[in-house]
Image (cartoon, rainbow, N blue to C red):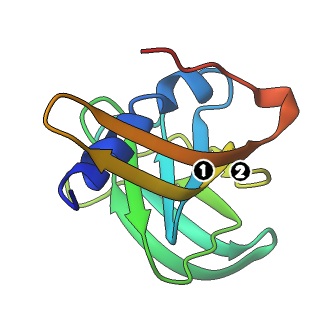
């Protein structure tokens, strides 16, 4: 049963392109894990997460994939204020676009995740809270 939980959470991350279409950034939490998805960066460029809107301290640096996307899930106290697509060339010689995206509002929060497995069916239940302006419907 514990193997199903990561699969279900990965399924939630499949919804991120729907939620992040306009803003190219998505942030949500499920249980004690925070999920971040950044899109529309220059492919293979670097991004940096910072702790405060005025800059603060560098929390993490990473390289986006060939599609210009980056996904991160963390269970510690990782609370970035914004992410920067770094405009200076990285070790691969790729420069980002210098765009800053702020983590202002979570897309949604999922709590009380419960999976009940029976031989013929698996039931996933959870409580969710989202920003009413960003409501979406999931149907299977």
Q: Nearer the viewer, residue 89 or 99?
A: 99
Residue 117 in view in this figure: yes
Residue 37: % across, % down: 48, 45
Secondary structure under tag 1 reads: strand
Residue 31: % across, % down: 52, 65
Secondary structure under tag 2 reads: loop
Mark found first going from the N terminus, 1 or 2? 1
Q: Is residue 120 left or right of residue 24?
A: left
Residue at the extreme front: 119
Quadrant hosting residue 78: bottom right
Q: Is residue 81 left or right of residue 87?
A: right
How many numbered badges does the structure rendering display?
A: 2
The residue shown at (68%, 42%) is 107
Residue at numbered disc 2: 106
Q: Which numbered tag is attached to residue 59?
A: none
Quadrant hosting residue 138: top right
Q: Nearer the viewer, residue 131 or 43?
A: 131
The residue shown at (60%, 28%) is 19
Q: Which numbered tag is attached to residue 27?
A: 1
Residue at the extreme top: 139
Mark 1, other Cα within 10 Å: few <14 / some 14–19 / many ≥20: many
Mark 2, other Cα within 10 Å: few <14 / some 14–19 / many ≥20: some
Pick the quarter of the image with the N terminus. bottom left
The residue shown at (24%, 30%) is 121
Residues at discs 1 and 2 in contact (Cβ within 8 Å): yes
């Amino acid at each position: 049963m514990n193997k199903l939980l990561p699969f279900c959470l990965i399924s939630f991350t499949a919804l991120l392109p729907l939620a992040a279409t306009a803003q190219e950034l998505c942030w949500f939490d499920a249980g004690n894990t925070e999920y971040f998805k950044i899109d529309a960066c220059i492919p293979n460029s670097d991004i940096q997460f910072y702790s405060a809107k005025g800059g603060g301290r560098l929390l993490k640096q990473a390289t986006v994939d060939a599609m210009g996307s980056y996904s991160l899930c963390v269970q510690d106290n990782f609370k970035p204020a914004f992410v920067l697509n770094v405009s200076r060339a990285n070790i691969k010689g790729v420069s980002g676009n210098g765009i800053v995206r702020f983590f202002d509002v979570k897309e949604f929060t999922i709590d009380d995740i419960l999976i009940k497995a029976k031989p013929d069916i698996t039931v996933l239940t959870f409580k969710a809270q989202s920003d009413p302006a960003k409501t979406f419907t999931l149907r299977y």
